[in-house]
Image: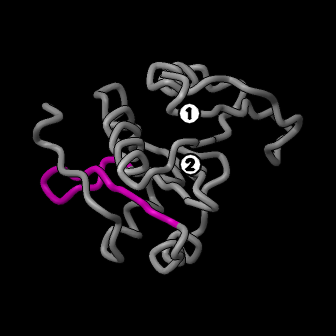
Amino acid sequence: MSNSDIILCKMQSKHVDAVYEISKKSLKEAWDKNSINAELNNPLASYLVAIKNDVVLGFVGIWIIAGEGNITNVAVDPTFRGLGIGKLLMQSILENCINENVDSITLEVRKSNLIAQNLYESLGFKNEGVRKKFYPDKEDAIIMWYRRCNL
């Protein structure tokens, strides 16, 4: 699959079911469908979906609060992992933030999720701390920041 075949667009109500299914398959703390749907009306939230042939392949969400971004979720359907879709989604959300003059973006990632940590580092995120026992299963979270001044 070529990334040129993938369309990135704002999440709409018609995408909620697919985003929910990807979330369930991909995230240990999947949001319920009502929470995902509520993000459509959250003025602080922005969600992008990656689509090919009307199939949602992945999504990314961010909250912009007081001029800073907080990545809420990033997930790619397991069937389509390893094709650069996660990187494409993250690059797009970073570009959107830069266009909106958001210079600092944070996220938490499981300490055990080295693939995601490597992706974020490749995009300019830096490991800046740990949230001990952050996740319900008590796994630590690595706190990562992207700051335009890092580049």
- Classed neighbour count for the residue bearing mark 1: other residues with Cα under 10 Å, few (<14), some (14–19), many (≥20): many
For label 2, the residue is: 71
Q: Which residues are magenta?
A: 45-58
Compared to 102, does 41 lie above or below?
below
Q: Position of residue 107 (x, y in %)?
A: 63, 41
* Kind of residue sitting beneath label 1: Tyr
Identified at 24% across, 52% down, the residue is 8
Residue 113 in the figure: left or right of residue 59: right
Which residue shows up at 36% across the image and 56% down it? 48
Can you give x and y, in whole percent of width and height, for residue 135 in the image? 79, 44
The front one of 126 and 31 is 126
The image shows residue 7 at horizontal and vertical percentages of 18, 50
Mark-to-mark CA distance, 1 and 2: 11 Å
Q: Residues within 10 Å of mark 2 (few under 14, many from 20)?
A: many
Magenta segment includes 17: no
Give the mark count.
Answer: 2
Q: Is residue 48 left or right of residue 145?
A: left
* Quarter-of-image position of residue 87: top left
Res 82 label: none
Q: Position of residue 39 (x, y in %)?
A: 51, 72
Numbered badge on residue 146: 1
Of 123 and 149, nearer the camera is 149
The image quarter in which residue 92 lies: top left
In the depicted structure, whether residue 111 falls above or below residue 138:
above
What element does badge 1 sit on? Answer: strand
Identify the image quadrant of the N terminus.
Answer: top left
The mark that comes first in sequence, 1 or 2, is 2
Query: What residue is shown at x 51% (from left), y 27% (from top)?
Result: 120
Identify which amino acid the numbered label 2 is placed on.
Answer: Ile
Q: Going 73% across and 30% down the picture, which residue do you hit? A: 142
